[in-house]
Image (cartoon, rainbow, N blue to C red):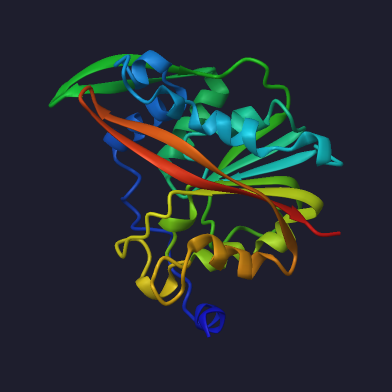
Amino acid sequence: GYLAKLTNAPRMRCMDSGTYESDELLHQYLLFHYGTDQEQMPWPSGPTQALEFPVRCVREGVKPEQLPLRNRALDVGCAVGRASFELAKLFGEVIGIDYSHAFIEAATSLLNSGEHPFEIKETGAITSKSIARVPSGVSGQLRFEQGDAQDLRSGLGQFDFVLAANLLCRLAHPMCFLETLPNLVRPSGQLVITTPNTWLEEFTAREFWLGATPETGAPLEAIRDYLEPTFVLDKVWDMPFLIREHHRKYQWSVAQASRWIRKD
């Protein structure tokens, strides 16, 4: 079956090592995470409801009234860290992990110095300058580290809340990550997964897609089949997001978000 095929498959890297290491993509993600609304979408007629996606992942994802403890949170696939900072407003300890060395270096620099410069592409080789800044209200202990979501280091421990934002469809073997979640999330803890379900063979061989084929059905059902032995599906909702490529070109997407409660 599908799970047996995955279990017996060799472990692979999340993605090609250079995919998320370019300066251009780093600056694009710093804008996506820390840019002002005007910087991200200067057109009044644009889809402004899609802004602040990393912040909304936390504000819409965490269900504090049903979270017994708020000691530790984990942001897997944290990119340049905006959601991690938001989690550090709610949790005593937060760890942000990403596969990209460039992303983690930028997030760590921002954490240590309070700001980090980046460039906004206008057109061609023309750019404008901006600065990413640590948001106010951060009170928890936060650190960033480079790591592979499919092969997380031992000793991470358990967490009251785990966020995996737009991660699954960029992994070579997404189920290698999903199989670690029962040990990562404490009983009664919460897990939030968002994904635009952009399954591409350049990242994930088709045989390891979570659903998304006529034979296997919808991705959410594939995730549910795996998680339900230890998690209860609490909520499903849509989360639009916007990535600016340059002044006149934008990526508008809608991630499917789901919140899961770890069984006692």
Asked if residue 67 is positioned above or below residue 110 in the image, the reply reads below
Q: Quadrant of the C terminus?
A: bottom right
Going 73% across and 48% down the picture, which residue do you hit?
A: 190
Q: Quadrant of residue 229?
A: bottom right
Going 66% across and 32% down the picture, which residue do you hit?
A: 87
- The location of residue 243, given as percent across then percent down, is 35, 33
In the rendered view, does 192 fall on the left or right side of 92?
left
Going 75% across and 65% down the picture, which residue do you hit?
A: 230
- The location of residue 219, given as percent across then percent down, is 49, 62
Q: Nearer the viewer, residue 256 or 105?
A: 256
Asked if residue 203 is positioned above or below residue 39 in the image, the reply reads below
Q: Quadrant of residue 83?
A: top right
Q: Nearer the viewer, residue 31 or 115?
A: 31
- The location of residue 7, given as percent across then percent down, is 55, 79
In the rendered view, does 88 fall on the left or right side of 146?
right
Q: Quadrant of residue 160?
A: top right
Q: Specify the farthest residue to the left.
A: 124
Asked if one can make out residue 157 in the rendered structure from this viewpoint, the answer is no
Q: How many marks?
A: 0
Q: Nearer the viewer, residue 166 or 60?
A: 60
In the rendered view, does 80 fall on the left or right side of 225?
left
- The location of residue 68, given as percent across then percent down, is 86, 41
Asked if one can make out residue 120 in the rendered structure from this viewpoint, the answer is yes
Q: Nearer the viewer, residue 172 or 141?
A: 172
Going 14% across and 25% down the picture, which residue do you hit?
A: 125
Asked if residue 114 is positioned above or below residue 154 in the image, the reply reads above
